[in-house]
Image: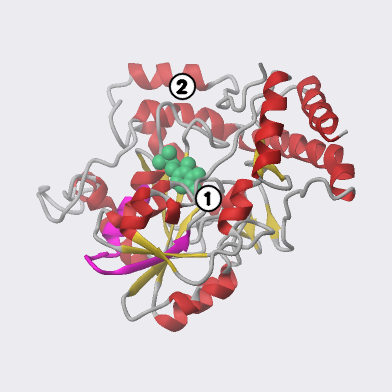
Amino acid sequence: MIPFNKPPFTGNEEKYVLESMKSSKISGDGEFTKRCHQWFEEKLGCRKTLLTTSCTHALEMAAILLDIQEGDEVIMPSYTFVSTANAFVLRGAKIVFVDIRPDTMNIDETLIEAAITPKTKAIVPVHYAGVGCEMDTIMEIAKRHNLFVVEDAAQGMMSSYKDKALGTIGHFGAYSFHETKNYTSAGEGGLLIINDDRFSQRAEIIREKGTNRSLFFRGMVDKYSWVDVGSSYLMNDMSAAYLWGNLEKADEINENRLATWQKYYDGLKELEDKCLIELPTIPDGCIQNAHMFYLKVKDLETRTKLLEHLKQNEILAVFHYIPLHSAPAGLKFGRFEGEDIYTTIESERLIRLPLYFGLQTKDQDKIIQAVKRFFE
Ligand SMILES: *Cc1c(COP(=O)(O)O)cnc(C)c1O
C-alpha cells in the first residue's frame, strides 16, 4: 500500500534528538528551541516566534493575547480543521463562518465585510493547502474595521503571498509541525508568529504558565512570579531537535514536494482538459509549498468510487474536512453568514493524493496511471 503520508526524516534528526536527550535541558526553551527560533526569525523576516506544543495551542495563545471574551465574534471559513474554531470557542467566542472561493478553497475575501457586526473582534484566514488567502484585501478590511487578523498558516510554512511569508502578514500567524505537515517536530508541535510588537512580551508570559520566567532568565527582572493567565505551551527541546533536522533541509524538502506536485499536475492535466477533473489553482503572487495535491471530481458519488478504486490499487488517498458549520459543535458554537454556495459542495468532491518527502517516482507514476484508468 502506498501510504498517504510519511513524516519527513532527512538523516540528522536522530542525532539531534539524542544530543538533546543527553543535554540537561530537555524541557522547553533549550538549545534546539533557540536555534529554531533564530532560523524562523531570519527566514521569515519577523521579529518574534515562539515554538509551541502544537498549532492548536499557538492559535489558543493568539485568542488569549487578543483578550477574546464571551460573546465576541470571530470570522473564518467553515472549510477548515476544528482547531481554527476551537481556539476561539474556548474563550467564549461565537464563530461566524463565511463561504470559500472554489478556486483555492480559501475564505472568500469579498464576503467578509458583510459578516462584520459590532461584536466582531478578529478574522482568521486559513491558507488552505499552503496557498495564500487574498491578504491585501483582508488586511485592508481589518484595518478599516479595527479588527485583528490571525493567520492559520498550519499548512503554510515556506509559502508566500506577494513576497511575504504566510503567517507574517496578520497580527499573528500559526504553523503546525504535526506529522502530516511538511515539516515536523517529534511528537506534536507548532509555532506562534507575533508580528505586532505590542504582544511579544505577554506572549512569552502566557506560554510560560503566566510567569515572567523568560524575562528573569534574560536578567530583565530579579525574580520571577505569577503575572498573568497562562498555560504550558512550550515545545520540549527533543521535539525541537527533530524539527531542527527538518529545518536544516527545508529547501530540499520543499523542492522534493514541489517536484512531486508538478508531476501530478502535468500527469493529470489531460483529464482536466477533458473536463473530468479540476486541478488546484495557485493565484498570481502566491508561491506555494506543495503541502497538498488535491483534485476535484464531479460529485460525492464519484469521489467515493475513486477512493475505492485507488484503495484496490493499493493507494491510500483521503478527503477532509466535514464543513464545521454542519458539524454538531459548529451548530452549537457558530453560525454561517450568507449562503453556503461552495463550502459543502466543493468539500464533497475533493480528494487528496499521497504526497510526502521522498515519495518515489515509480509510486507517483502508479498513482497517476491509477487515476487515469478510473476515468477510462
Ligand atoms: C493541522 C492543522 C491545524 C492543527 O495543527 P496541530 O499542530 O495538529 O494542532 C490547525 N489548522 C489547520 C488548517 C491545520 O491543517
Give the total of numbered labels. Answer: 2
Is residue 196 placed above or below 85 in the rendered structure? Answer: below
Q: Is residue 324 left or right of residue 86?
A: right
Q: Residue flagged by tag 2: what amino acid is it?
A: Tyr
Q: Which residue is mark 1?
A: 42
Magenta highlight on residue 119:
no
Residue 201 can be seen, yes or no: no
Residue 203: x %, y % from top left: 29, 55
Colour convention: secondary structure
Residue 222 image point, x, y percent: 11, 50
Disc 1 packing (10 Å; few <14; some 14–19; many ≥20): few
Q: Is residue 68 magenta?
A: yes
Q: Which residue is mark 2?
A: 16
Task: Decide which of 185, 217 is in the foreground and name it.
Answer: 185
**Image region (quadrant) for ligand 1:** top left
What residue do we see at 54% from left, 53% from top? 44
- Assign a secondary structure to mark 2: helix
Q: Which residues are magenta?
A: 58-77
